Amino acid sequence: MSDFREEEKLGKLYDSALTRRLMKYLRPYRWHVVAAVSITLGVTAMEIVSPYLFHIAVDKYIVPGFNSTITQHKALMGLLWVVAASAGALLGSFGLQYAQVRIMQWVGQETMYDLRKEIFEHLQRLPMSFFDRSPVGRLVTRATTDVDALNDLFASGVVAMLNDFVLLFAMAAILFKWHPFLAFATLSPLPFMILLTYFFRNKVRNANRRIRTAIARINAFLQEHISGMAIVQLFNREWKSRKQFEELNRQHMEAYKEAIDAFSFFYPAVEFLSMAGLALLYWVGGLRAIAGTIPIGVLLAFMLYAQRFFRPIQDLSEKFNILQTAMAASERIFKLLDEPFTIVSPAEVWSLPSARGEIEFRNVWFAYTGGAAPKEEDWVLRDVSFRVDPGQTLAIVGHTGAGKTTIIQLLLRFYDIQRGEILLDGVDIRTMELQELRRLFGIVLQDPFLFTGTLASNVKLGTERITRAATESALREVGLGPFLESQPQGVETRVTERGSTLSVGQRQLVSFARALAHDPKFLILDEATSSVDTKTELLIRGALDRLLQGRTAVVIAHRLSTIQHAHRILVFHKGRLREQGSHQELLGLRGIYYRLYQLQYKEQELATPVGGGGPGYPHALPADD
């Protein structure tokens, strides 16, 4: 499940270090940002000029025309010019804001694209040890929800806040310069609004923390229970799961209600203070207008300015929340991007243009935890040494937790060993380029993983040299010919997420076809036939015989009868290589392998007919474990 503490963390309202890193993503679009920021001055000018034009219309044309101090024609023409100027200001404001929004939304989408691409590329280069300790849901959140929060900041938050601040300061400066007394009356509610916004921000801040925590728990719960729905239904846990989800859902609802309560108080309170300021302006300004000390148009212009002044304040707290959420999201994203690449290609690499197929472990020690100096109890492999000649089939057996799968992960350099060496054709794999190393291997796992796409795309996995004909041939060779013929689209048959529309055996056969099509020098089979029935195993035996010819193979199996004809069998126990030799040699030792064989498979071998097959693959086909 997700680490909820990360979702609970609240970012500072402003963090200079995070801001500098965020600006790096705006750098490629800096001229667009400069243009959008420059437009702010034009937008502010358009916002300020309209009330002033209203003052001119009233004091220079409407009132004089009403009092007949100017001709009616002059009053109408002047009013017409003021109306035209006001319309021009409105259209100018519309055009400038339209351009500003378009520019920043474009910048926001581009930065989201760049950031998501960088996150995914970074995830692809991180070691397996990182994924061992990081829930998938949390990593998905970093590339989706957290990036969306930054989009809100880039696309609307920063420029909108800049517009608001420039407008507020410019308007306040103009009002105080124009008529200080009326300016004091107009802005008198401002200190109360600032205090109100401060308390509101803290309340909404806590509510948003609870909302984020609740939604993180809901996401984790849904991910776990939807993935494990078969177990939920099998053990009749529907009622229990519903009750748990109801509680999580209730926590989310209560957190949202807290935020709603805050908003329902804040906006009416700001409106009340705004109207109180206007009422005060009406009173003190009206008295002076009646006394004739200020023109009526000035009073009306101040009223319009007051309405425009308080409008951004209502939105200010929401923009603070956008900024704070973006800071918290950026902190989490940069924490992910700062994860080091502990498995990297060296600066100077050795190449194997034509690998012979030799594998050697020399005094290998490995632990998943503890760094360079693990504790004694943390070692998974202890002083392991063995050698596989080119073209040989090596089998690895042992109890669960003995270190069998670890051997494969170290060969593919998903993890680096703490001591010793792992060599391919005498070359330390740590001196090889990672992609070249892994390109030498084909692997078939016990639980095959298929991607959303087609049969062809799952066999090719993007390898351009594999043609459609080679893809279809590989699928037919592993026994999927009848299945292809039953599908109208053939190799282009759609495959859904994790291959859910295929049977377990069919998914395994596709993974065999994948290894066959890539024609690797080294082949790894990790319980590769445990998911297929006897009939299916017979179908793939011929393909495996051809696949194993001339290749070095490493086979992990719990069914000892499936590896009896391997050239050499390694027996692991508690992280150490305890026995090695052929099937008959190990039986003759009457040690660990002999006891495993006696306990698990002697009766099955007596009941199972011996079939044909090549020297690198089992002849006997036992019943499933």
Image (spheres, rainbow, N blue to C red):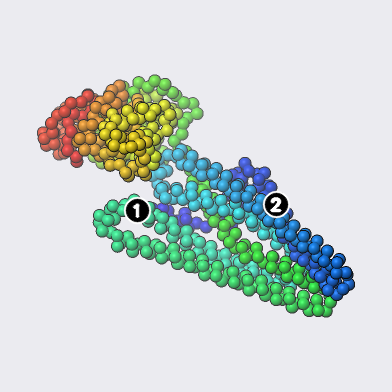
Identity of the residue drawn at 73% across and 76% down? 282
Q: Which residue is mark 1?
A: 226
Regarding residue 323, the answer to whether it shows in the image is yes
* Residue 520 x %, y %: 35, 27
Residue 413 position (above or below residue 357): below
Residue at left 51%, top 44%? 116
Residue 405 lies in what quarter of the image? Answer: top left
Q: What amino acid does circle 2 point to?
A: Ile
Q: Nearer the viewer, residue 308 or 215?
A: 308
Query: Residue at 68% of width from left, 56% of height from top?
Result: 94
Give x and y (percent) for residue 497. 37, 44
Label 2, secondary structure: give it: helix
Q: Residue 413: image x %, image y %?
A: 39, 33
Label 2 CA crowd tier, 10 Å (few <14, some 14–19, many 20+): some
Q: Residue furthest front?
A: 73
SS of the residue at dot 1?
A: helix
Q: If you read the primary sequence from the N terminus, does the residue marked by circle 1 or circle 2 appear first?
A: 2
Percent of width and height locating residue 265: 56, 71
Image side of residue 282 versus residue 497, left or right: right
Total numbered labels placed on residues in the image? 2
Which one is nearer the viewer's eye here, 509 or 390? 509
- Going by the image, does 191 lie left or right of 530? right
| Between 551 and 588, the one nearer to me in the picture | 551
Residue flagged by tag 1: what amino acid is it? Ile
**Label number found at residue 39:** 2
Q: CA distance from mark 1 to mark 2?
A: 49 Å
